[in-house]
Image: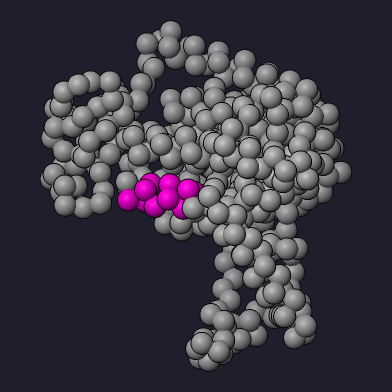
Amino acid sequence: MLGTRSVKVLAPFLAKYPPPLGQLLTRRGKSALAHATEILEKELAGIKEAGTWKSERVITSKQGARIRVEGTDTEVLNFCANNYLGLSEFTPGQGLPRFTGGRGLHGEDLHKSLERKLAAFHQRDDAILYPSCFDANAGIFEVLLSSEDAVLSDELNHASIIDGIRLCKAHKYRYRHLDMRDLESKLQESQKHRLRLIVTDGVFSMDGDVAPLPQICDLAERHGALVFIDECHATGFMGATGRGTDELLGVMGRVHIINSTLGKALGGAAGGYTVGPGPLISLLRQRSRPYLFSNSLPPAVVGSAARALELLMGDSEIHRSVRERTRRFRSKMTAAGFSVSGAEHPICPVMLGDARLASTMADDLLQRGEEGTPPLWSVPTTA
Ligand SMILES: Cc1ncc(COP(=O)(O)O)c(C=O)c1O
């Protein structure tokens, strides 16, 4: 396991030459992963044996009737697009289906390049892009877990995790928010299941509180479970080099799967992804429904996320400045007599203790224009 200090020292080197996940994993964590990998590889072999393996064809040209595809020297006729009217020629969209007519999957080299960048950024084997992180969360549980398995989920996890879990047949255990005793008792209760997956937001969006990942990883390793975190509120700015909560808490090699969004720190447009072990990502490409049955991200969005990632990897000042501004906001608000909950996270919930007062204050701030800070909305993100 890497400590926070060694992550800091090693950060530039790790950014350039990320070690594969296997080398970072501790022995027990690896055995949970080895068990899962065996199951996943069997599934992958079964798909190949059945002759239903979907190979991705990477389009290297603009979308149209004639396209170029990786691995061929000439243009080919494109019988596999959603671009009914040919209008993608005049728009930033590509009308790019993932799956058409039961035959091939289509990616684009821009998409592939972003997937490689995301895997390198998180120092994981591989990555897969989705139209949103909601989709990434909706599409993972059903693929990874069957009725023989169990999922253990923090009760305040994001709505998309809750919905993703609803879609799978695994046995469901909900542990009390951040409560390690309750998680341990649920791990004991669920011993009989084949695979067990602990899932938690890295940072919880309502209060900005951070999951106790070192303790979660200890428990997972003791009980042979996998760990999966949603990093929508951490990717890009938590940890010494902005890798996320796993970096902040020194457990980068102990967390197996990460889902995150391109729609927040990484450019703010849209998009989501999963990074993790190679066999899992391969199986998601074969079976994950939001990936297969929805258009892929528009190239303009992919390009802007790739650029955001490049900027972030090249300049540590970017995420450092958000940390400093957060500290200033928190300390000035506290000094002014407000109560700001959460820890050091940029989510700074100002607790007024009265919904009507919060709404009046938001209107009042908006009226003040530049003097005031735009408003406080209360958005439930779990249900
Ligand atoms: C913790 C968490 N997970 C997932 C999502 C969904 O992300 P996206 O907007 O990319 O669908 C959000 C969005 O608010 C979130 O806060």
In magenta stretch: residue 369: no
Question: Residue 347: where, in percent of width, then height?
Answer: 64, 65
Q: Would you identify the image quadrant in which residue 277 lies?
A: top right
Judge from the rendering whether residue 315 lies leftward or rightward of residue 210; answer left or right: left
Question: Residue 239: where, in percent of width, then height?
Answer: 68, 51
Question: Residue 263: where, in percent of width, then height?
Answer: 47, 55
Position of 88 relative to 36 (above/below): below
Which quadrant, please, contains the C terminus?
bottom right
Along the line of sight, which residue is nearer the eye, 26 or 82?
26
Total labels: the figure holds 0
The dominant secondary structure in magenta is helix
Picture residue at 44% right of the left edge, 28% below the top: 285
Picture residue at 78% right of the left edge, 83% below the top: 335
Question: Residue 298: where, in percent of width, then height?
Answer: 32, 47
The residue sitting at the top extreme is: 49
Which quadrant, please, contains the N terminus?
top right
Picture residue at 32% right of the left edge, 46% below the top: 299
Judge from the rendering whether residue 67 lies leftward or rightward of residue 124; answer left or right: left
Q: Would you identify the image quadrant in which residue 259 lies?
A: top right
Picture residue at 65% right of the left edge, 33% below the top: 256
The span picked out in magenta is 300-310
